[in-house]
Amino acid sequence: MKYVLAILGLGVACAIWMVIQLWTGSKSKKDRWRGGGGCGGHVILFAAFVSTLGCENNTELTQSTKNIMGTPISVTAPTGMHATVFEVFRQVDKDMSEWKPESPLTIVNQNAGVAAVQVPADLFQTLKKSIEIAQLTSGAFDPTWASLWKLWKFDGRNTVPTKAQVEALLPQVDWKKVELDELTNTVFLTEPSSMLGLGGIAKGVALDKARDTLVAQGLKDFMIVAGGQVLVHGSKNGKPWRVGIRDPEKEQTDYFAVLELTDTCVSTSGNYEKFFMKDGIRYHHIIDSKTGYPARGVKSVTVISQDATLADALSTALFVMGVEDGITLIESLSNAEALFIDESNAVHQSSGFTF
C-alpha cells in the first residue's frame, strides 16, 4: 500500500506542493508511516494546530463536546459511548491536575522537600513515563516545568519576568529530583517548592485510556479531539478519518492541508496557542526548562504516533529541542514521525517523510 504526503508551503511557498511517497511493508524507518494497521489513501499534512474537518453523514456516529482539562474534548462515536470518553478525561483530570487542590498530584507538590506521597497507579505510571521521556529528551520534556509557571501568566497582564526572578526558580526545575518508588507507588519531590505539572502529557494519557476503553467494548470507529491532539480509530463510512491542520499564520478555521488517517494519534504544539506580545516579541506558553523562557526557533511541531501519550509529550519536547536536535532524536525512535515549521517558515521532517 502506498501513502502520499502532500505539503503546502508557507508564505511564498504556499503555492508549492511537495509530494512524498511512503511505502508500507518495509521495516526501515525511511519507508514507514505511523498510520497503524490500515491507513489508506492520501495523507496531506501541515504542522500547526489540529482541528477536525467535516465528514460524510453517518447515522451511527454522532459528535458532542464538553470542556474538560481546560480544553474542549470532542467525541465522534456512537452516542451511547460519549459519556464513557468524557468520564475517562474527568478521571485523568481529577488525578493529574496540578491546579485542583484535592488532586493527588497537588498533594505531591504540597509535600515537596517534606515527604513521599502514595498516589494512584495511573498517576504513578504517568509520572514514570514522564521521567522516561525527560531522560530520552535530555530534559526538553520536564514534568517539573510547572515550577516556572508561576512566573508566566497568560491572563492579559503581559508581564515578562525578570532574569533574576527566572534564575531564582530554575533550581526547582530538574526531573532528576523526582523520586519514584514502584514498591509503594510513592512520589517524592526532593527539591523544596518544586512543582510537578502534567499539562504536556495528560491529554495523551487520557486519549490512550479512552481508546483502550472503547476498543475493549468492541467499538471500531471513532475520533477523539483534545486540544492539539487528535486520536482516530477505524474509519468513517469505510474511509480514513480526515483531520485538518491549521495554518499558524491564519485563523483557526484556515487549513494548510488534510490528513487522512486511521488507528493513530496526531499531536501538535505551536507558539500561537497561548501567547502575548511585548515590545514586538512573542512570549508563548512552551517554556524551555533550561532557560526559563519560551523556546525559540520553531513555530510548530507535529508528531504522529500510535502512542498518544508519547505523541503529546514529544510534540512539546521537540519544540523545545529545535529542528536539528529534534530530528536527531526522532530518527532514533521506531514509533513516531515528526514535522517541524521553523521561525523562517521552512519545513523539516523526519526521514519517514521522504521526497
Image: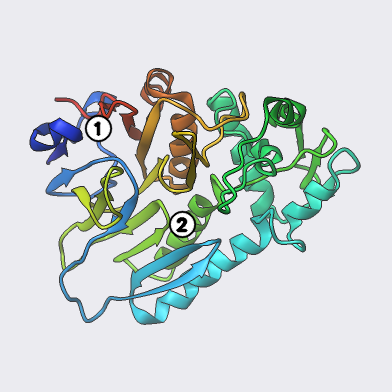
Task: Tell me the number on the disc at residue 32.
Answer: 1
For mark 2, does the 10 Å Cα neighbourhood hold few (<14), some (14 to 19), or many (20 or more) residues?
many
In x, y percent, where is residue 57?
A: 17, 76
Task: Tell me the number on the disc at residue 61.
Answer: none
Answer whether residue 99 is visible to the viewer in this image: yes
| On screen, residue 167 above or below 129 | above
Decide if residue 2 is on the left or right side of residue 175: left
Q: Residue at x 90, y 43 (%)?
A: 115
Circle 1 SS class: loop
In x, y percent, where is residue 325?
A: 43, 19
| On screen, residue 325 above or below 349 | above
Between discs 2 and 1, the one toward the N terminus = 1
Label 2 amino acid? Leu
In x, y percent, where is residue 326?
A: 41, 24
Decide if residue 120 is on the left or right side of residue 141: right
Decide if residue 31 is on the left or right side of residue 63: left
Which quarter of the picture shows residue 20?
A: top left
User: Image quadrant for the N terminus?
Assistant: top left
Circle 2 SS class: helix
User: Image quadrant for the C terminus?
Assistant: top left
| On screen, residue 86 above or below 329 | below
Number of marks present in the image shown: 2
Q: Residue at x 41, y 25 (%)?
A: 297
Label 1 amino acid? Arg
Cβ–Cβ under 8 Å for marks 2 and 1: no
Task: Tell me the number on the disc at residue 207.
Answer: 2
